[in-house]
Image (cartoon, coloured by chain):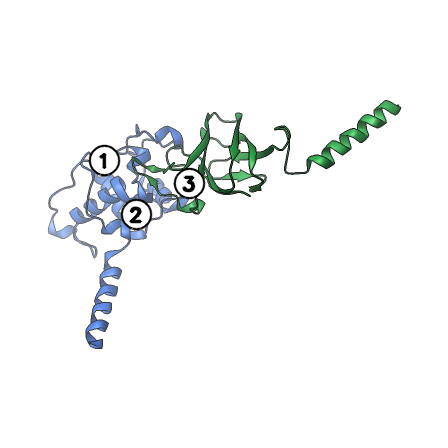
Chain colours: A blue, B green
Amino acid sequence: MRMLGALLVGAALVASACGGSAASAQTAAASAAPAAPAAAPAQNTTSQGSAADQIERGKLIFQKTAGGVGCQYCHGPEGKGGASAANSVNAPNIRGTTEAKLRAALAGGAALMTFIKLTDQEIEDVLAYLQYLDN
Amino acid sequence: MRIAAIAFAMALLAVACGGGASGGGGAGATTVAVTLTDKEVTLDQANVPAGKVTFAVKNSGTLVHSLTIIKTELDHAKIPQDPKDAGKADEKGKVGAVPQLQVGASKQAALDLAPGTYVLVCNEPAHYLLGMHVGFTVR
């Protein structure tokens, strides 16, 4: 019995470590957002899965989970601005913004994004999604 | 000269009797200065006697702000999301508000507050998330 308990705890710890943050554990995605690709070439796989998986994760973070509201809350569902909250936080259109600027903002460099806390992997996921939108 | 001295003495007496916590709102009223910056709601006093309380609110930030006063026992950082707008705090228990203030603008709200704990928030979209909330106690 004790052995079984230890195994269960171990399995839970491994699942937690592999799953990343609570934000990336959610599976629902906003229907208004552009669909992520169904599949990606095999050579684009990463340690976190395929490129398509990464884009899908980035979409979920962007649309739903970043800061509890998703980036779209201020930047609009496609990052082009126009969200109801855009004026209240001066949120700009971010489409076409350089990766360096996006990365800096997502890493906490934007004054009005301090409630957005993303892991390094989540930042990469969002960048992949925005790159996908731009392409 | 004598009149001036008497006037000065009366002014001193008025200040002494008024105390630091009260002001401006008539007998027994308390005025609380509220400053809104883009990431904070700050008060010049966070614990006042029950009764008439005037919130003198100034927008010292760079964005449009507002102030909502909510009576709640919850910690000011743990107000649940508005079920209809995830970027706002739930206003359940709202007892008063100062509507949108343009940058640099000021406005007052006079309320009659019962003893208890309150939370003051700026509930413009995403502003609660940015940290624009503070606790307030009426004793």
SS for dot 3: loop
Disc 3 chain ID? B
Q: Mark 2 points at which residue?
A: A123
* Label number found at residue A134: 1
Q: Name the residue under label 3.
A: B130
**For the residue marked with disc 1, what is the amino acid?**
Asp
Binning the other alpha carbons within 10 Å of mark 1 as few (below 14), some (14 to 19) or many (20 upward) gives few
- Give the spatial CA distance, label 1 vs label 2: 16 Å
- Residue A127 against residue B97 in the figure, above or below: below
Residue at mark 1 shares a chain with residue at mark 2: yes
Rendering quarter of residue A5: bottom left
**For the residue marked with disc 3, what is the amino acid?**
Leu
Rendering quarter of residue A79: top left
Binning the other alpha carbons within 10 Å of mark 3 as few (below 14), some (14 to 19) or many (20 upward) gives many
Disc 1 chain ID? A
User: In the shown orientation, is residue A135 left or right of residue B68?
Assistant: left
Residue A85, position in %: x, y?
A: 34, 31
